[in-house]
């Protein structure tokens, strides 16, 4: 088992990474303060892993809520099902919520924990690659709005993150690739050496080689933990983790939640960000080709959907949380392996990227 720490003073917490950790009945109890626990999962993940998880919860008053599965259910309405379950099971301020599932369950469970009785403890048990390398760490929680991704939410850090890499055995190939989009992101932001490793080891990752996956998860969590420790509330550096997301969230929202997976939107969105960076003269044509090559290796889309017009993009992108006083900010590549947040990009070049010319 490997351990990382998200350093946040007296709110610091560990990330445990290893094969078979769900079976380790000694891990979770240390992070449960009161006598009761509620597990939030979904209709796909609960039948696979809830029974194993429950063995760690013996001795606690344990209850559960099972959500419908899908990005389309990451809503305020479905969030209310968690609150109803918590009230019906007499959860109080000492209750710990355990989120067992992918990023949707983690974001919703985390937001429920942030807001139930004004805040209770929670634990992240991520079961998709994307949630292991990104969403379970850092405390961004929330739900979507029909008009925009993750528009309602809160920062609320977990007590710990338990990553059982064996749960990836049951994940679909498409979801595995979606997770790799966020892994590649860390390389593009500031780790060229990791990008090279990913290029060399992509086929091992796609074949679910346990050692390759564990390494990619460890390095990704290390980057995420360091960024969150430096800038918990996204005053500056953390915004770089949004690389590809202003375009990508527009794709997800514009195409209807769930039609494009989050990681797929991030992949195509990162290519769009790279195209704009190239038009600005910051990266070369060869760099852009390398970005596309890496996503292609990971079996991810490099072309955005043809259905969305430039106006569709602008409408959704203006609602992004990085927009300040009506000015859209983007994360762009200043060079390969170095990103910046900027509103200082050429309007014509931006329009060309949106129009695909
Ligand atoms: N909070 C953050 O910092 C952050 C970061 C990145 C993404 N996100 C959010 O995360 C969400 C995407 O998360 P995701 O990619 O995990 O999608 P997801 O939660 O929808 O999970 C993908 C699919 O895999 C299934 N699944 C989960 N674990 C499984 C397993 N072990 N075996 C078989 N099936 C399994 C799920 O039921 C679902 O159908 C988006 O809503 C995105 O906005 C949040
Ligand atoms: O943790 C962060 O910070 C991120 O930006 C990680 C992203 O991968 C994630 O998709 C996040 O939810 C997007 O943030 P948002 O604030 O634009 O919703
Ligand atoms: Zn993301």
Image (tube, rainbow, N blue to C red):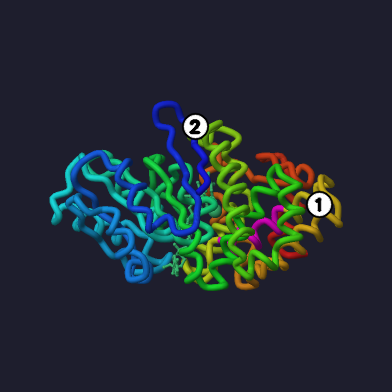
264 in magenta: yes
Q: Position of residue 198 (x, y in %)?
A: 71, 57
Instruction: Choose top left, top right, bottom left or bottom right for residue 108.
Output: bottom left
Q: Is residue 286 left or right of residue 270?
A: right
Give the overall secondary structure of the magenta segment.
Answer: helix
Instruction: Choose top left, top right, bottom left or bottom right for residue 345.
Output: top right
What number is the disc on residue 279?
A: 1
Q: Is residue 318 visible?
A: yes
Q: Position of residue 27 (x, y in %)?
A: 36, 47
Q: Which residues are magenta?
A: 263-273
- The reply to whether the C-beta atoms of the residues labelled 1 and 2 are less than 8 Å apart is no
Where the C terminus falls, by quadrant? bottom right
Q: CA distance from mark 1 to mark 2?
A: 38 Å
Q: Position of residue 319 (x, y in %)?
A: 51, 50
Would the CB of label 2 be found within 8 Å of ligand 2? no
Viewer-closest of 124 and 154: 124
Q: Which residue is mark 2?
A: 7
């Amino acid at each position: 088992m490997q351990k990382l720490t998200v350093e946040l003073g007296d709110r610091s917490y560990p990330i445990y990474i290893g094969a078979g950790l769900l079976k380790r009945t000694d891990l979770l109890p240390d992070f449960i303060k009161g006598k009761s626990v509620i597990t939030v999962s979904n209709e796909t993940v609960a039948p696979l892993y809830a029974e194993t998880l429950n063995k760690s919860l013996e001795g606690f008053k344990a209850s559960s809520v099972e959500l419908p599965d899908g990005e389309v259910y990451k809503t305020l309405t479905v969030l209310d099902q968690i609150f109803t379950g918590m009230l019906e099971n007499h959860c109080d301020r000492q209750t710990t919520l355990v989120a067992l599932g992918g990023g949707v369950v983690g974001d919703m469970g985390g937001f429920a924990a942030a807001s139930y009785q004004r805040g209770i403890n929670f634990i992240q048990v991520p079961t998709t690659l994307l949630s292991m390398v990104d969403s379970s760490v850092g405390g961004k929680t929330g739900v979507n709005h029909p008009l925009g991704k993750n528009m309602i939410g809160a920062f609320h850090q977990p007590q710990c993150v338990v990553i059982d890499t064996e749960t990836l055995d049951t994940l679909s190939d498409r979801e595995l690739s979606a997770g790799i989009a966020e892994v590649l992101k860390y390389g593009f932001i500031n780790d060229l050496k990791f990008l090279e490793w990913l290029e060399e080891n992509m086929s091992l990752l796609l074949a679910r080689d346990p050692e390759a996956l564990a390494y990619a998860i460890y390095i990704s969590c290390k980057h995420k933990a360091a960024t969150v420790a430096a800038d918990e509330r996204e005053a500056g550096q953390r915004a770089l983790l949004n690389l590809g997301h202003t375009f990508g969230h527009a794709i997800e929202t514009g195409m209807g939640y769930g039609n494009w997976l989050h990681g797929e939107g991030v992949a195509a969105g990162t290519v769009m960000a790279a195209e704009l960076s190239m038009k600005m003269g910051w990266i070369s044509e060869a760099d852009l080709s390398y970005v596309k090559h890496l996503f292609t290796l990971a079996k991810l889309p490099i072309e955005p959907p043809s259905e969305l017009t430039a106006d569709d993009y602008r409408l959704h992108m203006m609602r992004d949380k990085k927009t300040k006083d009506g000015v859209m900010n983007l994360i762009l590549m200043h060079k390969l392996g170095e990103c910046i947040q900027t509103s200082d990009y050429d309007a014509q070049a931006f329009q060309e990227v949106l129009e695909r010319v």
